[in-house]
Image (cartoon, rainbow, N blue to C red):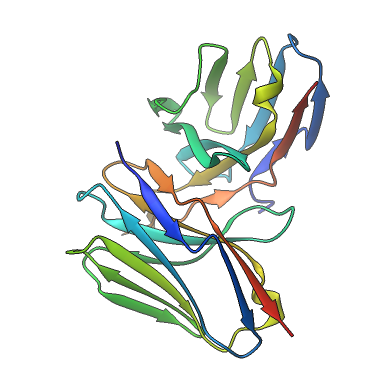
Amino acid sequence: GENVEQHPSTLSVQEGDSAVIKCTYSDSASNYFPWYKQELGKRPQLIIDIRSNVGEKKDQRIAVTLNKTAKHFSLHITETQPEDSAVYFCAARAGGFKTIFGAGTRLFVKA
Amino acid sequence: DAGVIQSPRHEVTEMGQEVTLRCKPISGHDYLFWYRQTMMRGLELLIYFNNNVPIDDSGMPEDRFSAKMPNASFSTLKIQPSEPRDSAVYFCASSTGLAGGIRTDTQYFGPGTRLTVL
């Protein structure tokens, strides 16, 4: 069945450094890849997404890259700040609206 | 708009009892999703509806779980009988397939219901 693997499970960086989270997906029909941020005790919120016809997308300090051939996609956060500390989830969606989530990455940004 | 509304926010019940979780999607959204989040299994899609019709319920774990959407502004997720392993945070999310004529996929999550089954 469909599967999304996410690495690392925990990531600790110094404030101002970059953070990279990587995901792979199994369903070659996947065409939409959102990233969600979830703060402790809060709901997941979409921070950026990318479609399969685009290789890269950037929004201020956040960027996402997609390699369809390798079925990899990654989240890049530059100039990290303490408020970036949260759990980040990647996800992949093929036909319809069924979205498969990765297991999450807990990001700690040390001031 | 108040966003997706879920009730109750917290539910504590005893094993064997019936539990009903409620969700009101964002007005105008025609997709509604139920997710379950646990430390062990992460965020899992249980079922989703389009225009009040269940489209994919392959994530519903057992026959003890059922979901309904009687109208565009209300959905329920019922567990009967509940078991301790059902303890989790249950999220409802909604989405609109089109916004301004453009395909959009953003799912907006509700605050969740934290269920504890003793």
Query: Residue A57: x percent and y percent?
Result: 35, 77
Above or below: residue B22 compared with residue B35: above
On the rendered structure, is B48 left or right of B23? left
Q: Is residue B85 above or below residue B24?
A: above
Percent of width and height locating residue A66: 29, 69
Query: Which residue lies at the image location 54% right of the left edge and 21% below the top edge?
Result: B67
> Which quadrant does the C terminus of chain B fall into?
top right
Q: Vertically, is B111 above or below B18?
A: below
Question: In this rendering, would B28 be left or right of A5?
Answer: right
Q: Nearer the viewer, residue A86 or A10?
A: A10
Q: Residue at x 40, y 53 (%)?
A: A5
Residue at left 31%, top 77%? A56
Name the foreground residue: A24 vs B49: A24
Residue B100 visible to the viewer: no
Relative placement, left or right, of A111 versus B101 is right
Q: Give the image quarter of residue A88.
A: bottom right
* Residue B26, x across and y down, in percent: 58, 46
